[in-house]
Amino acid sequence: MTTDHQDTDTTILDTDVLVVGAGPAGLMLATELRLGGAEVVVVDQRPGPTTESRASTLHARTMEILDSRGLLDELGTPPCEPRGHFGGVPLDLTLPSPHPGQWKVAQTRTEELLQRRAAVLGADLRRRHQLLSLEAKSEGAGRDEAGQVGAGQDRVEAEAIGPYGPVRIRARYLVGCDGEDSTVRRLVRAPFPGRDAARELLRADVSGVEVADRRFQRLEHGLAIAATREGVTRVMVHEFGRPAAERGGAEPDFAEVTDVWKRVTGEDISQGTPLWVNAFGDANRQLAHYRHGRVLFAGDAAHRQMPSGGQALNLGVQDAFNLGWKLAAVVRGSAGEDLLDTYHSERHTVGRQVLANIRAQVELLLGGPEVEPARALLTELVALDGVRQHLAGMISGLGIRYDVEGVDFGAGAAKGVGVGPEIRSDEHPLLGRRLPDAWLESAERGARRRTTELLRTGRGLLLSPDGDGAPALRATAAPWSDRVAFVADRPAAGGPLPAGQALLVRPDGHVAWAGSGPAGLARALTRWFGTPAADD
């Protein structure tokens, strides 16, 4: 457990994982670590959840994630819009999911929701704590030859300043979730290739103005966006050809927003009262590695992008959801450190794809008249359902497919060995994808339950057909029964799950193995859930 004691004037904390940053990614990570049995301390400079709703969209996959942890009831029924956009071109986001479309939830509410759950699960959240330094600790070791915190260290030691003085935190792992200007990233000297912002959107939440809603309206001199909810109008504006300003970390003032808005739209909004003003540019950077020994990164600390289509917050929450169960398993000792390498391989790939689609969207959004032919062509293409589904899957996160087969189990291991010879990804559409929300029926209980509900414990699942093959599957999975629940219910007829096939599902809901018999199951269980517990 996390311990807390004094050494002269310094508070000393010992824990399994130190999370730096209590935004959506950091809080989601804290909940997953606690659900997985790891002790966690979270430090954040802010006094509480953000009061600035920089992000206001939860996409379908993020809603599924919250559902799989029993968090949606607290959200109520937020507004849902089935239509999104790609670079300002309207895009129907409807795909098979219990939560299709984009859900309008202020970032403030998302953080409050996750903070409450983290606290209930026992996370130690320390507000008004600023990280000052970190160092990998082991005998005679500090940084590697590249000047980075190296692999194989015993622990990470961090120094912070809190409201009551210095704090030293000793942890087995540290995760930087501290945003696009990450202190952790700077201290680790992690390579962060990409490009700085060349263009920007100005944004303000304003009360006391009446302007027509504008949905990505391209005018002669620029782009204008406006939407009013509960008496507050959010305006966003870009003037074609206007470069991103050097602000030195400061935000624009309201006068700058009103001046640019008037030049682009001809409207005067200077009589309004600004509640919040900021600017976000088209910087596009991604860490070369999400793992640096015992230091890992998630959310905007790992990638910097314009939040086009509401993807930034969702990308960070999904980073944390992928990492949390893996890091908890390593901390508990039920899995080896190589499991953490799959966090980088899976989420770095997704991040690279998201950053690429955002770059394309930025050109379509902020480019001048020269991009109109491309916009016209895209408008025609999204009318083709295959194109629409591909883009909607990308934006919503529902199209993510991890390479669960491509993990090397040892020297010379062939691709696919992790899932056995029976069914490969080119033969089974669910391998690597998230488990669909589906009804399962039990012949014994005469009851039905949803697959999503079964994920709420944070354990893995082995969904087994209730036929002749079930005993062999149960026997194979028995040594992992402390980590994987065996479920011998049959899929409801007409649902999205295949009849007569077993599925091994990771705690994050992604399918890691499929088959009608036990071939390959033990290897997949070992790969994703570690060596089975020794018999007493």
Image (cartoon, helix red, strand yellow):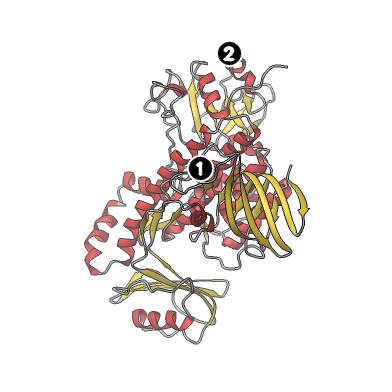
| Residue drawn where x is 48% and y is 81% of the image | 254
Residue 309 vs 338, above or below: the answer is below
C-alpha gap between disc 1 and disc 2: 43 Å
Which label sits in the foreground, 1 or 2?
Answer: 1
Q: Answer with mark 1 or mark 2, whichever residue precedes in sequence.
A: 1
Mark 2 residue element:
helix
Q: Residue furthest front?
A: 140
Residue 237 vs 43, above or below: the answer is below
Q: Which residue is mark 1?
A: 150
Q: Would you say 429 lies left or right of 527 here?
A: left
Residue 185: image tag: none
Give the camera-side residue of 108 and 209.
108
Give the camera-side residue of 158 and 208.
158
Q: Would you say 532 lies left or right of 384 here?
A: right
Type of residue at label 2?
Ala
Give percent across and percent down for residue 410.
Answer: 45, 22
- Location of the C terminus by quadrant is top right
Q: Which residue is mark 2?
A: 472
Give percent across and percent down for residue 530.
Answer: 58, 26
Q: Is residue 506 visible?
A: yes
| Residue drawn where x is 74% and y is 64% of the image | 164
| Residue drawn where x is 35% and y is 68% of the image | 199
